[in-house]
Amino acid sequence: MALDENKIVNLLDSAALAAKAILETVKEDGFVHVFSHLDADGVAAAGIIGKMLARLDAKFRIRITQWIDEKIVGEILADKPQLIILTDFGSGYIDLLNEKLADFRIVILDHHQVTGKETDNIVHVNPHLHGVDGARDISGSGVAYFVAKAVDKVNVDLAPIAVIGALGDLQDKYDQRLLGGLNEVIVKDAVDAGLLTVEKDLIFFGRETRPIHKTLSSTTSPFIPGISGEEDKSLAFLASLDIKPRHGERWRALRDLSDEEKKRLCTGLADYLLSKGLHYEVTNLIGHVYTLNSEEPWTPLRDAREFAVLLNATGRMDRPSLGVAICMGDRGAALEEANKVLEEYRRTINKYLGWVMEKAERMREFENIYVVYGEDFIDDKIIGAISSILSASLPNPEKPLIAYANVAEEGLAKFSARTVDTMTNRGVNLGEVMQVAAEKFAGNGGGHNIAAGAQVPIENVQAFIAVVNELVGRQLRGEKVGN
């Protein structure tokens, strides 16, 4: 669906205002403090703004965090920056910013649903303010990219980082895993600059880096029963299709297969999935693949979706500076270290998924939702990744999933909520649900209709879950739950 030209112009106009505020601060030799969210999109957004500021020879600091709270406010008050830039969050904290930081100049570059009304000290760039869907048409790093491009056209070379952020935010929701809306404009910039190639292909994770049998055995989207998690069965399946997993001594990756072999593999997998009654999974085999031309083949940076997972891993595993450095161009020590972090991240995810599946009471079904009780076992920084993976394989996909983990030192529980397009089409808006429910318990919540989060005091967890269950039910009955 083509985007309204006026909406694009209005969003770009607000990006130009943010660029003006940044340039004015830098010209006055002001100090800029950048805060960004810790997921792949947030790390990519911070990398874009960091590179832009470095090119301006600005004085700046970047801090990656889960949310904005009193501690962050205290940091800002102590630091006294001339400009605060918030990327991939901020739109849900406007009341807090107005109350605590009214004397500071603030630029918000976000794509989440907006709560509160900003004052004159805030320049706010957000697609929702212009009728553009921030859940599928542009991500936080995309908003950051348009601002960087408005600062200086040289920053067009950062378009691939915004593409990575959008894919990390699972915005490839158009036909056959395509990025659409304003993301399409960014993709075009990257393609025109010769930095990106987009093609249709088998869309398995690890197409650039993993031996084919490992790619098949490690896939969860689509989940292939009898092959996912089973390397030996995966090898046997390839043998049955006469696809050789090695070339001499070297294992072959998906990228090494001929078109004829890819066709055989695709047909074989489709037939196998259909024989298991998994019609929906067949549609997930082929999709749009985003290849970064300037990255080395056989590395996790070559495929944009793999790059996004690497960034997500650095943010979730408390090493976000590595991800930001890679986005800003470091291909040495930071990349080497990030690859180790990625392996640890994968092991951690598998450990948590195994733990949830081990006992039935760790994931319970309610009338309108599923709840994963991560409590003190699952790391609160990884609860979002766990909820995304589990929400893709629920017994009843028509129910949203919320998962939580305790942040004991803060006395909070961190919630992450996910659902599918069919539910948002029926009126479910998780951003609203999490905001309204959290506010009832002196917490904070918000996000997108399809994915959202909240923080509430630990002692209110059970009551919060009950309210979320009730609010989702009300939305399904067509009732309005927000303001």
Image (cartoon, rainbow, N blue to C red):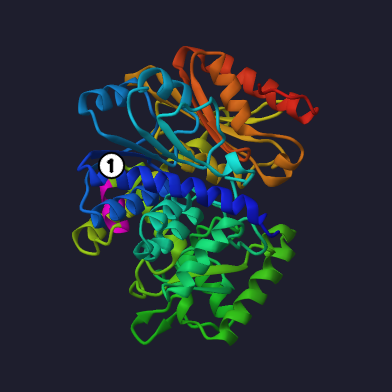
- Magenta segment includes 377: no
Q: What is the span of residues highlighted in magenta in the rendered image? A: 321-327
Residue 84 % position (x, y): 32, 35
Report which residue position mark 1 lands on: 25
| 370 w.r.t. 348: above or below | above
Left or right: residue 97 versus residue 117 is left
Q: Main secondary structure of the magenta part?
A: helix
Residue at 25% across / 46% down in the picture?
26
Which quarter of the image is occupied by the C terminus? top right
- Magenta segment includes 325: yes
The local secondary structure at tag 1 comes to: helix
- Residue 85 appears in the figure: yes
Residue 336 % position (x, y): 23, 60
Residue at 57% across / 62% down in the picture?
184
Residue 261 % position (x, y): 57, 84
Give the residue type at disc 1.
Thr
Query: Viewer-proximal residue, 208 or 56?
Result: 56
